[in-house]
Amino acid sequence: MKKITQKFLLPLAFIAGLFMISPGCDEESVDEIINLLNSLGWLQPEENLNQIATDINLSQGGNVPSAVDLAPKFPPIGDQGQYGTCVGWSVGYNLKTVIEGIDQNFTTSQLAQASRQFSPKDLFWAVSNSNKGADCNGTTFEAAFDVMQARGIATMATVPYQNLGNCSSNPQSAWTTEANNFKITNYRKIDPDVNTIRGYLAQGRPVAIGVRVGDNFLKWNSTGVLTSDTYGYTGQHAYHAVAVAGYDDNKGPNGAFKVVNSWGPQWGNSGYIWIDYYFFQNSFCFSAFVANNKRADFAPDADGDNQVDDGNIISGTADLIAWDLYDYDDDPTDLRTRTIFYNVYNMGDRTIYSSERWNIVYIYYNAYDANEWGILLYDYYTNEYDNANHNGPLTQGPGLSGNWWNNINVPGGSSVAHQFGSEGFLWDYTVPGNLNGYYYMALVADGYDDIQEHNESNNYYYFTDDNDAPLYIQNGIIDDPNGKRSAYNQSKRPQNPPSRKGEPSPAPSVVREGNLNAYTTAEIRQMIQHHKQTGELQRRIQQFNQQAQNRNKKRM
């Protein structure tokens, strides 16, 4: 919430009048309400939620315990005072402290130590002044998360929450030096609904939320459940950031969430408040976020360097790598029709057999919500059909534009196309006409993760716009990047294959400086595996079985 301006004076004067005639209310109570209104600080109208990546939700619906309490994993209740720093408390002091503590197995007594807690002051000072409200009052989740991802956050031992002073100043160099040791890998928005948030809490993942607070919330001092509120004091502008520490399906009339505030232990139920499920979803919660700590990212690339961690490298010497990919306009009369040129190498020294039944897929996914995704082309390597060294179109498959099978083995040190005596594959496809927005295309070798490999992180090659930005697609027509894979050109192709086992793909990831919060290859791989295991891929096979999926596949 931005600093209270003149338009709030009339409502606050009205409140003061109410307190003067209301039993049990005095001037001190009025000051307390005014202080609470000032100590909010989420600039909700400036939040750019449409361009924050949505988490790939792999939870299994309602299969969660009836109650979860992560409060013991939180630091002691904090107090932001009269400053609009609630976002820093929500995502820095609470969320970051919790995920760091989980990674390090900190005890309750350790979480009470300033050296184990993260500083809202450091985080708030590090946010650009352009992303703060008037007189440094308030910021957005996006701005705070971006700082924790790119710079990190210092501890309360180094930057205590006192003497907030001129928050427009730059953080001290010592603060930044320490902060660089404590970054998040990424952050994701999630659906702010009851079942989704219960699912994350059941996985042991705390959730930061943006809320609108009302009159009852401001004065709360009960162990009961807040089931409704009025907004006489706060109007339409009381946006606040808090965290969710747990839930109980049997609390109150409908079940409730345990919410952590930053107004000190004297407020609410020792700093906490229970929020009714229905009220939470319909009126209280406006947005929700989770984050991955740098040490807690998805396996096998826990440290986020897009290489398999040493302890997770799978034994054996097969290593598929997506090397060539060119995607270009094929028919000027039909801009949705395109062609890709591609190839995949086996960089290991073990033959990958058709009996292992693996695939190469060309996928699309929404750059800001990878739950919107699809397989465009499906190239299946199997011994299920016909004799060895034969191939042909599949009568059904998950590819929207094409499905093909190949009964071939791929020896170590050789490319897939080489088994056909060619330099690579050409395959036509049609972009779905309902795609509108920003998307990535990716060629994925071993799309279902069937092959144990030397390096799992080099299976991806992305088709992007300039500077690794997502492609803009309107009604299935890709706005081609100028001069970057916009037309097939032999001179653009790598002249030589990679020479060393495990050498990275030329475009293995879209996570780059300036695009740090893009989905990692590990997230996309886990998403594909999940949909295979749950039967979603089979459902898509059936859904598109009646369509004319197979277009002409040609080899050079």
Image (cartoon, rainbow, N blue to C red):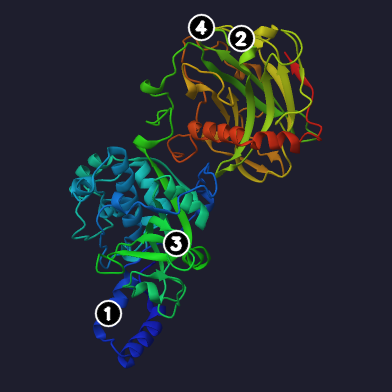
Mark closer to the observer (2, 1) = 2
* Disc 2 crowd, CA 10 A, few/some/many (<14, 14-19, 20+): many
Give residue 410's mark: 2
* Amino acid type for the residue under numbered disc 4: Asp
Mark closer to the observer (2, 3) = 3
**Residue 9 drawn at (x, y percent):** 37, 82
* Amino acid type for the residue under numbered disc 1: Asp
Residue under label 1:
31
In terms of image quadrants, where is residue 442? top right
Mark pair 4, 1: CA separation: 74 Å
Number of callouts in the render?
Answer: 4
Vertical comparison of 234 with 321: above or below: below
Mark pair 2, 1: CA separation: 75 Å
* Amino acid type for the residue under numbered disc 3: Asn
Mark pair 3, 1: CA separation: 36 Å
Which numbered disc flags the more N-terminal residue, 3 or 1? Answer: 1
Residue under label 4:
349
Which numbered disc flags the more N-terminal residue, 2 or 3? Answer: 3
Residue at the image position 25 percent from the left and 63 percent from the top: 79
Residue under label 3:
250
Q: What kind of element bears circle 1?
A: helix
Q: Nearer the viewer, residue 170 or 215?
A: 215
* Amino acid type for the residue under numbered disc 2: Val
* Disc 1 crowd, CA 10 A, few/some/many (<14, 14-19, 20+): few
- Left/right placement of residue 397 relative to residue 514 reads right
Q: What kind of element bears circle 3?
A: loop
Residue 192 seen from this side:
no
Q: Nearer the viewer, residue 386 or 209?
A: 386
Which numbered disc flags the more N-terminal residue, 2 or 1? Answer: 1
